Image (spheres, rainbow, N blue to C red):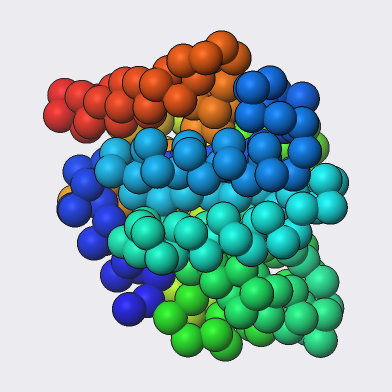
């Protein structure tokens, strides 16, 4: 089953477009869990198990694990998601972008080492830098398009032939790269107007949407701008607002409550 089919199945099974991002900051892991890599692993595993029934996907951010020298922890967390929650889509947030032979090694890392269903990639180096990822059968990519960070417009909004560069990226991915394999786009919730333009340009192509929660993106505006023709079409990510909903002994209950509340807010916005 390819990425697009897995996403559709997850959206319908859970009636949820919520994705929980796994960005483990060792300084914010509840102190009673400890202060070593075992504590980080326990923290992520417990978050996954507490929220799996209310999400369509999990998105580990590779930098948080690499910075701690915790690649083996990430391997085990990904294996846990695949083994215990096999219907959840596993997206590795790595933002890879390099020449073809190096990209091929990054693809092996994402799909063979970590077992991800999809990986985030940077389009700046062009088609040949993405092709190695799309050569992996039944896996896919989310291509950076209009990202949620404040400086994203420095290049993504540059005028190219009368329209912003990010729309050229969106159309190239939808019309050409998606013919090579399953593609989606990364478009931030912090720019709902641009999100709507991307949706209009790419039809029902899946969108990975960061920027709600700690980054302040508006859920209702995001759903109104980004839902596809079936009322789904988005993987709406929240990381810190769920992971660190409480720093106390109730941290896990608080994380689940935050995930449920966010899922319900997204659902309600889709039914207006």
Residue 227 found in image quarter? top left
Residue 203 appears anywhere in the view: no
Q: Residue at x 62, y 34 (%)?
A: 148
Q: Could you tell me which quadrant the N terminus lies in?
A: bottom left
Q: Position of residue 229 (x, y in %)?
A: 21, 51
122 with respect to 255 (left or right): right
Q: Residue at x 48, y 39 (%)?
A: 46
User: Going by the picture, which residue comes out furthest to the left?
Assistant: 271
| 191 over 130 or under it: above or below | above
153 with respect to 115 (left or right): right
Residue 230 appears anywhere in the view: yes
Q: Position of residue 92 (x, y in %)?
A: 60, 58
Q: Residue at x 37, y 76 (%)?
A: 2
Report the front residue among 6 and 97: 6
Q: Position of residue 32 (x, y in %)?
A: 64, 22
Q: Exactly how many numbered labels are in the figure?
A: 0
Q: Could you tell me which quadrant the C terminus lies in?
A: top left
171 with respect to 1 (left or right): right
Q: Residue at x 41, y 51 (%)?
A: 57
Report the front residue among 236 and 52: 52
| 254 over 162 or under it: above or below | above
| 54 over 126 or under it: above or below | above
Residue 128 found in image quarter? bottom right
Report the front residue among 229 and 81: 81
């Amino acid at each position: 089953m390819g990425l697009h089919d897995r996403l559709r199945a997850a959206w319908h099974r859970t009636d949820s477009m919520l994705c929980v991002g796994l960005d483990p900051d060792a300084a914010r892991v509840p102190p009673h869990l400890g202060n070593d890599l075992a504590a980080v692993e326990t923290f992520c595993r417990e978050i996954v198990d507490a929220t799996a029934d209310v999400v369509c996907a999990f998105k580990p951010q590779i930098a948080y694990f690499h910075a701690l020298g915790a690649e083996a922890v990430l391997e085990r967390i990904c294996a846990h998601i695949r083994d215990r929650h096999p219907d959840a889509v596993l997206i590795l947030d790595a933002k890879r972008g390099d020449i073809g032979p190096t990209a091929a090694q990054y693809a092996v890392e994402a799909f063979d080492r970590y077992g991800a269903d999809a990986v985030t990639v940077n389009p700046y180096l062009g088609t040949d830098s993405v092709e190695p990822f799309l050569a992996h059968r039944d896996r896919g990519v989310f291509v950076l398009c209009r990202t949620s960070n404040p400086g994203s417009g420095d290049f993504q909004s540059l005028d190219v032939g009368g329209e912003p560069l990010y729309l050229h990226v969106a159309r190239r991915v939808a019309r050409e790269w998606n013919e090579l394999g399953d593609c989606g786009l990364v478009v931030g919730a912090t720019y709902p107007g641009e999100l709507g333009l991307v949706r209009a340009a790419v039809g029902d192509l899946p969108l990975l949407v960061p920027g709600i929660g700690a980054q302040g993106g508006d859920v209702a505006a995001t759903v109104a701008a980004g839902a596809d023709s079936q009322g789904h079409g988005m993987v709406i990510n929240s990381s810190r607002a769920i992971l660190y909903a409480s720093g106390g002994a109730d941290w896990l209950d608080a994380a689940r409550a935050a995930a449920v509340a966010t899922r319900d807010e997204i659902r309600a916005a889709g039914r207006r």
